Amino acid sequence: MALTVGQQAPAFTLFSSDKKEVSLADYAGRNVVLLFFPMAFTSVCTAELCEMRDNLHVYQNLNADVLAISVDSPFTLDKFKAEQNLPFPLLSDFNKEVSAAYGALYDTFVMNMHGVSKRAAFVVGTDGALKYTEVLDNAGNVPNFTAIQAALN
């Protein structure tokens, strides 16, 4: 079932690329941009996260923190984060529970891989409610960054 604007964002706790637990509750009272992405080290995912890196000041000025989530292991995400110099947490949804809770999980992805995160973007407001939701079926597309920024305004 798809999440809709106004619903409370599903709570989660995941391990980050630096092997620390990070919970959505840690950001209570702040705006959060949640980005789900299929796989580290792939071209579109790299472009998407580097776009966020290069424009992080825009989101910071909108009082928003960025969290990026994939089903990659924390170890893979650590290498990816270092290689791309990403200044926000990368979270491992290795067990696929959070991607599923957000309706952002492929049954079958490329090369018959099962349980890969769909590319998706959510804005969680200071009250914990969803202000924006976008789940893309085509992994070759990127979220609408203009709409994400508008939801934060």
Image (cartoon, rainbow, N blue to C red):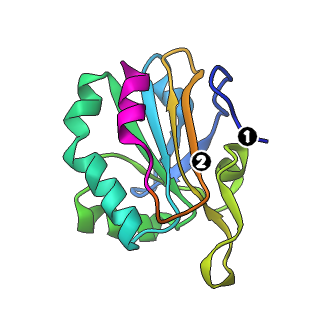
**63 shown above or below 89:** above
Q: Is residue 11 left or right of residue 88?
A: right
Marks 2 and 1, how far apart at CA: 9 Å
SS of the residue at dot 2?
Answer: strand
The answer to whether one can see residue 87 in this image is: no
- Kind of residue sitting beneath label 1: Ala
**45 shown above or below 147:** below
* Of pointers 2 and 1, the one earlier in the residue sequence: 1
Question: Residue visible at 48% across and 63% down?
Answer: 74
Tell me if label 2 and label 1 are in contact, CB under 8 Å: yes
**Quarter of image, res 83:** bottom left
Q: Nearer the viewer, residue 47 or 125?
A: 47
User: Which x, y percent locates residue 151?
Assistant: 44, 24
Extreme-bottom residue of the structure: 111
User: Which x, y percent locates residue 133?
Assistant: 57, 36
**113 shown above or below 125:** below
Task: Pick the quarter of the image with the N terminus.
Answer: top right
Question: Residue visible at 73% across and 40% down?
Answer: 2
Q: In terms of secondary structure, what is the magenta stretch mainly?
A: helix
Query: How many residues crowd mark 1 within 10 Å: few (<14), some (14–19), many (20+)?
Result: few
- Kind of residue sitting beneath label 2: Val
The answer to whether one can see residue 131 in this image is: yes
SS of the residue at dot 1?
Answer: loop
User: Which x, y percent locates residue 107?
Assistant: 74, 66
Boundaries of the magenta span: 142-153
Query: How many residues crowd mark 2 within 10 Å: few (<14), some (14–19), many (20+)?
Result: many
Question: Residue visible at 67% across and 34% down?
Answer: 10
Which circle marks residue 150 in the picture?
none
**66 shown above or below 94:** above
Residue picked out by circle 1: 2
Which circle marks residue 135 in the picture?
2
